[in-house]
Image (tube, rainbow, N blue to C red):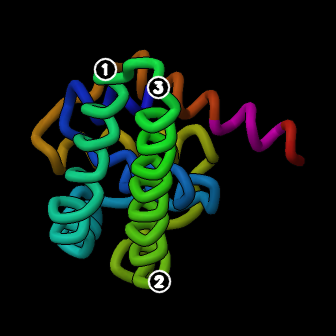
Amino acid sequence: MLLALQDEFGADVNIALFGLWRAKQGRSLSPSEFAALDILVAEWRENVVQPARRLRRAIKNSQDGSAAVSELYGSVKHVQLNSERIEQARMFAANEVAAGSCDHELKQAATLNLEAYGRMLGKVFPLDIVSGLASALHTMLDREG
């Protein structure tokens, strides 16, 4: 579902995950708070994360069964994941940029955050994706709890 937001709507999965993390805390973010997060990580995403993702996908689509290509794919995947971790760390380190308002139930906050992020992007995320992610978060946390 997150990849659908990325591939079909131009969403940054890491920003969406930040919104879901805030939902776990009962916080809902505004479109302007999502815009502040986007500004915070835009240069890193555009210059590092997205090129690494494109390279990984290009290698994946050019697999020839050789060990060398498979090893290269694994190395580039590692670079992409590490670059995304750095993006996440930058958002978490500056989370006061998007503190959000309090006192929302988990699923409600998750829904509000995904909808607000979509509005910031000028998009309307499909209800099935939004409710699916909110429910998945709720289910995952129920299992932990």
Membership of 141 in magenta stretch: yes
Q: Which residues are magenta?
A: 137-142
Q: Position of residue 38 (x, y in %)?
A: 22, 64
Q: Position of residue 130 (x, y in %)?
A: 42, 28
- Regarding residue 116, the answer to whether it shows in the image is no
- In the rendered structure, which amino acid carries the disc numbered 2? Ala
Helix or strand or loop: what does disc 1 sit on? loop
Is label 1 or label 3 in front? 3
Q: Position of residue 49 (x, y in %)?
A: 29, 57
Q: Label 3: which residue?
A: 66
Q: Label 2: which residue?
A: 93
Helix or strand or loop: what does disc 2 sit on? helix
Which residue is the extreme one toward the left? 122
Question: Left or right: where does residue 139 sit relative to residue 6?
Answer: right
- In the rendered structure, which amino acid carries the disc numbered 3? Ser
Q: Residues within 10 Å of mark 1 (few under 14, many from 20)?
A: some
Q: Residues within 10 Å of mark 2 (few under 14, many from 20)?
A: few
